[in-house]
C-alpha cells in the first residue's frame, strides 16, 4: 500500500516546539491534573491522525520502558491500564505481577515523526499498585510525591538542570558487540569545543539539538567535550520531576539519532580508559514564590545559609548515596583523580575534584552542583537522593566538614557496603526497595572481575543495566 494513503500526524519542528512549550508552561504553572486530563483526552479524541500513545516509565535501575497503546483504546481505558511487573527487573515477584499505569497528563510530549514515527505522542506514566496506591519501586513516583509534599507544606519548588555527557561510537550496536570487538571506535578526534561542520559528531550534535528544541527543551549550548567523540548538549533547568523526564528523553533522543546515523550514543561513564569519562553534573536549587533560596549576596560564595546546610548534609551522606549516583561497575572507573574526577567528599568554588562545586551565580542562577553523578544513574533516584538528603539529612560533626580529607569509594563493592549499612538509605528508600536495588547492583558486580585494572572488561559493558539483553541474563 502506498504511504501516500496514510494520514498519520506529522508536524513541523516549529509546530512541535510550540505545542511542547505550551504543555511545559502548563506543567510549570501547576495546572490542576483534572483540567489537563480533560484537555488531553479531548485532543486525542479530536485529532484523528494520532494512531497510538507511547507511555513511558522507568524501572528501579533507571532503564526507560515504553508501551504503545492504541489511541482509541487509551481514550476509553486510560484509568485501567495494567502490565506485567514481574517482567521488569526490580519490580514485582511473579505471584503479584499485575501493576497499573496511571497517566501523568502534564508530562505530555509531541515528538518528531522522523525519529519517533508518525501518528504518535508520548506521555510519562506513574506506576501504581493494584489498589491504585503509588508503587514503592517507581522512583519517579517517589520523587513526585516528595516534591509535591515540599511544595504543599513549605512552598518549595525543587529545581534541577543536568549536564549529561556521552560518547558517539561507530556502529549501531557498539555496546552490545563490545564482548566481540573488545573496543569502541571513535567517530571524531577533534577535541574540546572543536568539530568541523558536517563531520559525524557535529552532525549528530546538531540533529539532537534540533529534536530537543522541537520537544521544548529550551537549549542553551552544545559542543564536543574533552575526550574524543564525546559530546554535551545543555538545556535549561526545570522543576525536579520534569528535569528527570528530560534526562530520560535526552538519552532516548541521542540513541534514536545515533542509531539512524548507523552509530551508538553511549552513556557508559568510562567506556575508554585513558581519556576523560562522562558525568552528569546535577545543578540544583530551591525556590519559594519565585525567589531563589540559595542566593545571598552577603553569603560565602554568595550561597545562602540554607544552601550551605544543604551542601553539608550531602557531604555527610556522600558515601551512603554514592551507589545511587554511581550505579555500575564501570562508573567507578570515572572516579579517577587523573581525569578531573569529582571523588573528594568536599565542596569548592574552584576545585573540580570536589564532589560539590559552588558555581558563580546571581539571584536567579545561584545553585549547588553535585559533580559525582554518572550518566547511567536512574535520574529520579539521583534527584530524589540529592534533594531529600540536602533538605532532610543529617549533618556530621566532622571538623572542617567542607574541606576534610575524605574520598568516595573507588569500586562498586565498597559503595555497596556503604549503601547497605547506612541507616540513611533505609530512610530514603525503605528497606524493601533498598534491598532490591542493592541486590541488582550486586548481581551485576559479581559477573565482572573484582579488580578494575587498566582496561575496560567485557562483562562491565555486557552486563551493564543499560546494555544488557534479556536472553543473556536468563542464561544465569
Image (cartoon, rainbow, N blue to C red):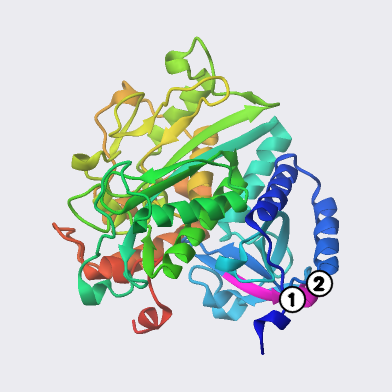
Residue 140 spot, x, y in % from top left: 59, 54
Q: Secondary structure at mark 2?
A: loop
Identify the mark at residue 332; answer none if there is no mark: none
Residue drawn at 80 percent across, 76 percent down: 72
Residue corresponding to mark 1:
7
Left/right of residue 72 with respect to residue 120 in the rendered view:
right
Q: Are marks 2 and 1 in contact (CB under 8 Å)?
A: yes
On screen, residue 307 above or below 125: above
Mark earlier in primary sequence (2, 1): 1
Q: Where does the image place residue 425, in percent across and percent down from the top left?
A: 46, 48
Mark 2 Cα within 10 Å, few/some/many (few <14, many 20+)?
A: some
How dense is the environment of label 1, judged by Cα within 10 Å: few (below 14), some, or many (20 and up)?
A: few
In the image, which is nearer the foreground, mark 2 or mark 1?
Answer: 1
Q: Nearer the viewer, residue 458 or 148?
A: 458
Please tell me which residue lies in front, 460 or 152.
460
Residue 96, by quadrant, is bottom right
> Which quadrant of the view contains residue 396?
top left
Q: Is residue 398 above or below residue 138?
A: above
Measuring from the top left, give residue 124's x and y in whole percent: 65, 60
Residue 201 at x, y percent in the picture: 35, 55
Q: Which SS class for mark 1?
A: loop
Seen from the viewer's position, the closer of residues 141 and 210 is 210
Question: Is residue 227 shown in magenta?
Answer: no
Residue at coordinates 67% horizontally, 55% vertically from top-left? Answer: 16
Q: Tell me the magenta residue range.
A: 66-77
- Residue where numbered disc 2 is placed: 48
Rendered-image quadrant of the N terminus = bottom right
Q: Which residue is the extreme one toward the bottom?
A: 1
* Disc 2 to disc 1, C-alpha distance: 9 Å
At a point 54% along the width and 23% down the height, the residue shown is: 294
Amino acid at each position: 500500500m502506498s504511504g501516500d494513503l496514510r494520514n498519520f500526524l506529522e508536524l513541523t519542528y516549529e509546530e512541535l516546539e510550540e505545542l511542547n512549550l505550551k504543555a511545559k508552561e502548563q506543567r510549570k504553572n501547576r495546572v490542576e491534573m483534572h483540567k489537563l486530563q480533560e484537555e488531553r483526552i479531548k485532543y486525542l479524541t479530536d485529532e484523528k491522525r494520532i494512531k497510538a500513545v507511547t507511555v513511558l516509565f522507568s524501572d528501579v535501575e533507571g532503564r526507560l520502558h515504553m508501551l504503545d497503546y492504541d489511541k482509541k483504546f487509551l481514550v476509553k481505558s486510560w484509568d485501567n491500564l495494567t502490565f506485567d511487573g514481574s517482567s521488569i527487573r526490580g519490580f514485582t515477584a511473579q505471584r503479584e505481577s499485575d501493576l497499573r499505569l496511571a497517566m501523568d497528563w502534564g508530562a505530555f510530549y509531541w515528538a518528531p515523526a522522523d525519529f519517533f514515527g508518525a501518528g504518535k505522542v508520548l506521555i510519562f506514566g506513574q506506576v501504581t499498585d493494584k489498589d491504585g496506591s503509588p508503587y514503592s519501586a517507581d522512583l519517579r513516583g517517589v520523587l513526585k510525591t516528595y516534591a509535591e509534599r515540599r511544595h504543599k507544606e513549605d512552598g518549595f519548588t525543587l529545581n534541577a538542570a543536568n549536564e549529561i555527557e556521552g560518547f558517539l561510537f561507530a556502529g549501531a550496536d557498539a555496546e552490545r558487540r563490545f564482548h566481540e570487538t573488545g573496543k569502541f571506535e571513535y567517530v571524531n578526534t577533534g577535541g574540546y569545543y572543536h568539530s568541523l561542520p558536517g563531520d559525524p559528531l557535529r552532525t549528530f550534535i546538531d540533529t539532537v539539538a534540533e529534536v530537543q528544541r522541537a520537544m521544548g527543551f529550551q537549549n542553551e549550548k552544545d559542543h564536543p567535550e574533552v575526550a574524543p567523540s564525546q559530546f554535551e548538549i545543555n538545556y535549561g533547568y526545570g522543576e525536579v520531576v520534569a528535569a528527570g523526564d528530560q534526562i530520560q528523553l535526552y538519552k532516548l533522543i541521542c540513541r534514536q539519532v545515533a542509531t539512524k546515523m548507523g552509530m551508538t550514543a553511549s552513556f557508559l561513564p568510562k567506556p575508554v580508559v585513558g581519556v576523560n569519562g562522562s558525568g552528569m553534573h546535577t545543578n540544583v536549587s530551591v525556590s519559594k514564590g519565585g525567589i531563589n533560596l540559595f542566593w545571598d549576596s552577603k553569603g560565602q560564595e554568595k550561597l545562602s545559609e540554607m544552601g550551605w546546610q544543604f551542601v553539608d548534609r550531602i557531604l555527610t551522606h556522600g558515601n551512603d548515596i554514592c551507589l545511587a549516583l554511581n550505579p555500575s561497575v564501570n562508573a567507578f572507573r570515572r572516579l579517577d583523580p587523573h581525569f578531573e574526577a569529582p571523588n573528594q567528599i568536599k565542596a569548592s568554588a574552584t576545585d573540580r575534584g570536589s564532589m560539590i562545586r559552588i558555581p558563580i551565580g546571581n539571584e536567579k542562577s545561584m545553585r549547588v552542583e553535585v559533580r559525582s553523578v554518572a550518566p547511567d544513574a536512574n535520574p529520579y533516584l539521583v534527584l530524589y537522593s540529592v534533594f531529600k538528603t540536602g533538605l532532610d539529612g543529617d549533618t556530621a560533626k566532622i571538623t572542617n566538614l567542607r574541606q576534610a580529607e575524605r574520598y568516595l569509594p573507588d569500586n562498586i563493592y565498597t559503595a555497596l557496603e556503604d549503601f547497605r549499612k547506612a541507616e540513611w538509605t533505609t530512610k530514603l528508600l525503605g528497606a524493601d526497595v533498598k534491598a532490591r536495588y542493592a541486590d541488582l547492583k550486586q548481581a551485576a558486580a559479581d559477573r565482572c572481575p573484582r579488580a578494575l585494572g587498566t582496561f575496560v572488561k567485557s562483562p562491565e559493558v555486557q552486563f551493564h543495566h543499560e546494555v544488557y539483553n534479556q536472553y543473556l541474563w536468563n542464561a544465569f
